[in-house]
Amino acid sequence: MTTAIELAGLGRAYGERVALRDVTLTLEAGRTLVVFGPNGAGKSTLLRILATLLRPTAGTVRVLGCALPREAWRARGRIGLLGHDPMLYRELSARQNLRYHARLHGVAPERVDELLDAVGLGARADDPVSTYSRGMVQRAAAARAVLHDPELLLLDEPRANLDPAAAAALEPLLAGPPQRPRTRVVTSHDPAGGLAEADVALGLRAGRPALLAPAAEVTVDEIGALYR
Amino acid sequence: MRVLAALLRKELRLELRTLESVPGMILFGVTIFVVFHFGLDRASVEGDLAAGILVVTILFAGMLGLNRLYVADEEQGGFDGFLLAPVDRTWLFVAKAGALFAYLVALELVAVPAFALLLLEPGLGQALPELLLVLALLNAGFAIIAALVGAIAVRTRARDLLGPLIALPLLIPVVIGAARLLEPLLREGGAGGLDATWLAILGLYDLVFGLLSIAVFDPLLED
Amino acid sequence: MHGKGLRGLSVATIVVLVGAFAIAAFYAPLDADQGFRQKIFYLHVPLAIVSLVGFIVGGLLAVQHLRSRASIWDLRSYVAIHISLILGVAVLVTGAIWAKTSWGVWWLWDEPTLVSFLIVFLLYATYTPMRFAIEDPERQARYASVFAIAGGAFVPICFGAVRAQEQEVHPQTFGSGELPGPMWLTFLVSLAGMALLFATLYRFEIETKLTRGRLRALRRRLLDDDAPVQRRSAAPTI
């Protein structure tokens, strides 16, 4: 087993406001880390650091064997991010958006059509994203996040705008092929559902890790306590 | 080059879809000519006055383009989407400057004939190739400064104010150079030639700020 | 221990500046055309030179900031530009006074140095508002550094372009080489005084900001998370 993520004393401050501090953990490749915590606990900050979009202000980060931020350029293109922001241009269609990202990542255009069908957008793929429902936007964004078949997938509340059926339909795409499952970091507000898919659970409270354990050893109540 | 083509295609497609920049720039430019007509109370202009009006009009109309240049990327996650891709960040600067250059050309395709029609006494025919060369250098200078300053301004509050405020002083050498070069071209009764010194200054300015912008652009994209 | 040498620097500044003004007033010969009014030259020109050099130094310090990402370099760059901007106001005022006394007008577009200085000043006048308009201090520092580098490179280019324009109209005959010896000496002493003034103000502001930063850090450590977060500011926080 190789190590996908290695954090030691990771911290991030915005001036004097500390968003994240003292996060130390390792995650094996192919495992899923679920991050729990109330809004503002630092979940999105953690994801943005792992995505190489944000420089840490303390500690060290290794993602996919690359030390951030120095070797970020080597990790980029192997990481997918599905955040609150769909990162789609509203005036362009889903197909145009995905084609654009495919060109940036050097992915064949056929993969775009394939993915659009897989997320059930085939029929509406040529309409502007601004005409989509929130669920459709989320599906298009999920297709964008896995377009380049990333080894590490970062998901910020991926099911927020999805009905259960759509969420289930996306699952194989986000999980990756069974023989080579993706490493995933997922943020969640749903203790039971989150624990069910987690290998490792991390609880954040005001930027500090309040809980870090294998998911099997964590109870739903312990997660619930983070929000109190 | 694959990346540059992808970025440029996205830029132009977005502009074609939204028409947020170019039509506004054109309308603004033609309106400024009308404003100059009444402000100066002149039916026709030539020489240095004509050169000044043309350069100032392109500059001010271009400011609309500067203000819109990065707004879609800032508001719709385009920066993050680009940063996640394993590509050189400099391409974004080149693509933005290229897109703005294209918008300025579109503006001038309408505004310059309109200028000839509404205000310019000597007509454009007498030194058209030289005129196009000077406009190209002016556009390049504007596009470079705007692509740099726009990236700074878009992530500030009050970006529509800061963009032009920072860009205008930086553009003054371009204004001086372009106006000096255009003056003999727009003179009544036969165009004069291009001044090699001013051509060199304008070209050098474009080159120096182009390289400088590329050197300092990357830090603007990080979060 | 901080602020070491600040006292000596301050004293040296006062001595050299007062000395410079004294020899400008009593030793330097009266100008043939302009008489006593020309003496403002010993105030205006050194101020302008020091201010412009300060802008360029601010750009070089910003290069260091982007390389190292250490906020101390951003602070240094900020302070250099900040003081240059303040001196810049004095440059424009003394320049206008000089223009009024020598040529009878408050402003002269034919004077390329004055015009270039105005353009540079207008550019840097947006530096502080730009900083203030960016909330995240880290991003503020980065953007300010990009601004400072572009601005620093712009200073000589702007002077070159404006001077080239003016030379077409009427060539400059007043070159520094034609200055008589005593005038030169007075000018150099004034320049040294202004440079010392800049250095003193620079050191003073840096030390103030650093001390304030340390005070805040101590208070934060005492009060932990209860310490108030600093209000948004255009100045770098250390």
Image (cartoon, helix red, strand yellow):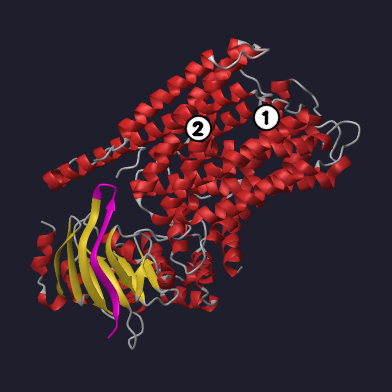
- Residue C178, percent across and down? 69, 26
**Magenta stretch?**
A1-17
**A95 vs B81, nearest the viewer:** B81
Is residue B151 depicted above or below C83 in this figure? below
Q: Secondary structure at mark 2?
A: helix
Kindly identify the residue that appears in the image at 33 percent across and 32 percent down. C8
Kindly identify the residue that appears in the image at 49 percent across and 78 percent down. A111
- Residue C16, percent across and down? 44, 25
Magenta: main secondary structure equals: strand
**Of label 1 and label 2, which has the lower sequence position?**
2
Q: Secondary structure at mark 1?
A: helix
Q: Quadrant of residue C180?
A: top right
Label 2 sits on residue: C51
Q: Is residue C41 at all visible to an observer of this figure?
A: yes
Q: Is residue B104 at all visible to an observer of this figure?
A: no
Q: Chain of mark 2?
A: C
- Residue A163 magenta: no
Left or right? Give the position of B11 relative to B194.
left
Q: Chain of mark 1?
A: C
Circle 2 Cα neighbour tier, 10 Å, few/some/many (<14 / 14–19 / ≥20): many
Is residue B97 depicted above or below C6 in this figure? below
Residue farthest along the bottom direction in this orientation: A179
Q: Quadrant of the N terminus of chain B?
A: bottom right
Is residue C25 depicted above or below A163 in this figure? above
